[in-house]
Amino acid sequence: MKILVFNPGSNSLKAGVVRCHPAQETAADGEKLVEVICEGIGAEAKLSVYRGKKIAGSESIQAQDFGEAAAAILQWLMQGKGPHQGLADGLACIGVRVVHGGSHFTEPVEITPEVEREINELAKWAPQHNPSSISILSPIRERFEKVPMIAVFDTAFHRTIGDIAGLYPIPFEISERHGIRRFGFHGISHRYLMERYAQIVRRKPAELKMITMHLESGCSATAIAEGRSVDTTMGLTPLEGLMMGTRCGNVDPALPAYLMQAEGIEMSEVMHILEKQSGLLGVSGKSLDTRVLMRHYEADERVRLAMEMFSYRVLKAAGAFIAALGGVDALIFGGGIGENNTLLRQRVCDGLRWCGLRMDPESNRTVIDVEGRLSSEDSRVQAHVIPTEETLQIAHECSVTLEAANSRQHRAVAQS
């Protein structure tokens, strides 16, 4: 079956068409037919077509918001020429990534008016993300009125995190009253990294303990045992956890109140600082992009500080998860930073020599934006790079959902 996938980010919209095969067991077995991304939404927007990790071509488009960006992508697909002709024909469904699914959405679901209202309600915990998923639904419906849309939730993979790791140490009654707990995010990516690594080493996820790391503008690490997420660095919102591109990650809970008083600003302004002006950008004063920062690493003290702080926090999270898991079989580096930043990978792997991880320096130098092993052959703990493929994972989960629904329908007909 052919599935169109939309993946809204903080300020970009990615889309792709994937062919899923009936017998495929993991997302990596799917076939990506095309992938595009709209960047610069609300400013000078452009639509880029990707071939693998490289841009094959770009064009300027009108996209003042995510709805217009989705409409532009759909228009491009409908007018596809050459190898892109007919890609939007015969779609089985359309998959939409939704960041926050709360406690209710623990698996993919068809987007009904009720589901849409609940996703919108959950925007209180993900105001930078859930509204983007909602805003693209209308232009999709206009083009594909009869094609089912399925929401795939970032939080669903982390539904297995128990109360010991999932609850905050605040009054229990308050947690219950408001549904406050650590939900975790990037679950689509973490599931892909887990299943792809198990496929590479020809073992079942249930046989492995691993730490998966999704390191991009937004960053998180997840501890996985027996194929289940048992802890992750993000929490109630995507602001908790690791230092990120523009997000602060973990800070003293008293800091917002102090900044309001010391700077004479409102809470909304404090949140803007913590979400949009902190992290790598805030410390370096230069960029949130580690590719840019590494060009200034030797000459700029603040850039060095930002990269060392970032690496230290990833290392610290990995070490904590190794302790929580009681040992680990593998560390998986995914996301743009994990896939190409050799400094970060060296800092983390060298910092974990005590647990038996031995990095191969030559592999660290050459394994860039491709799958590959970073650890030496005699390393007790393995380290791998796996480029994350959220588009394939979303399509795969949609395919599984559709097949399960068809199976239930056939059983119901047979029993009637």
Image (spheres, grey):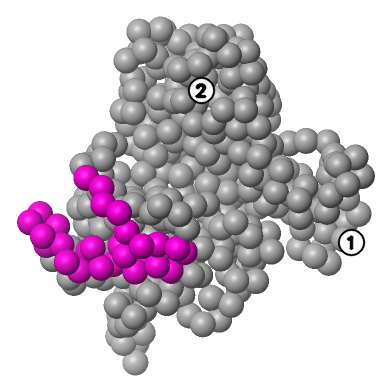
- What span is colored magenta in the figure? 57-85
Q: Are marks 1 and 2 in contact (CB under 8 Å)?
A: no
Q: Is residue 339 above or below residue 27?
A: above
Badge 1 is on which residue? 173
Q: Is residue 114 above or below residue 237?
A: below
Residue 406, quarter of picture: bottom left
- Kind of residue sitting beneath label 2: Leu
In space, the residues marked 1 and 2 are separated at their CA atoms by 45 Å
Q: Nearer the viewer, residue 65 or 388?
A: 65
Crowding at dot 2, Cα within 10 Å, few <14 / some 14-19 / many 20+, comes out as: many
Picture coordinates of residue 30 (x, y %)?
25, 50
The reply to whether residue 278 is in sight is yes
Q: Residue at x 59, y 19 (%)?
A: 303
Q: Nearer the viewer, residue 133 or 57?
A: 57
Q: Residue at x 29, y 77 (%)?
A: 143
Q: Nearer the viewer, residue 334 or 298?
A: 298
Mark drawn on residue 27: none
Badge 2 is on which residue? 293
Residue 132 among those drawn in magenta? no
Q: Residue furthest left?
A: 82
The reply to whether residue 225 is in sight is no
Horizontally, residue 135 falls left or right of residue 340, namely right
The secondary structure type at the circle numbered 1 is helix
Horizontally, residue 217 falls left or right of residue 316, namely left
- Kind of residue sitting beneath label 1: Glu
Q: Residue at x 91, y 54 (%)?
A: 171
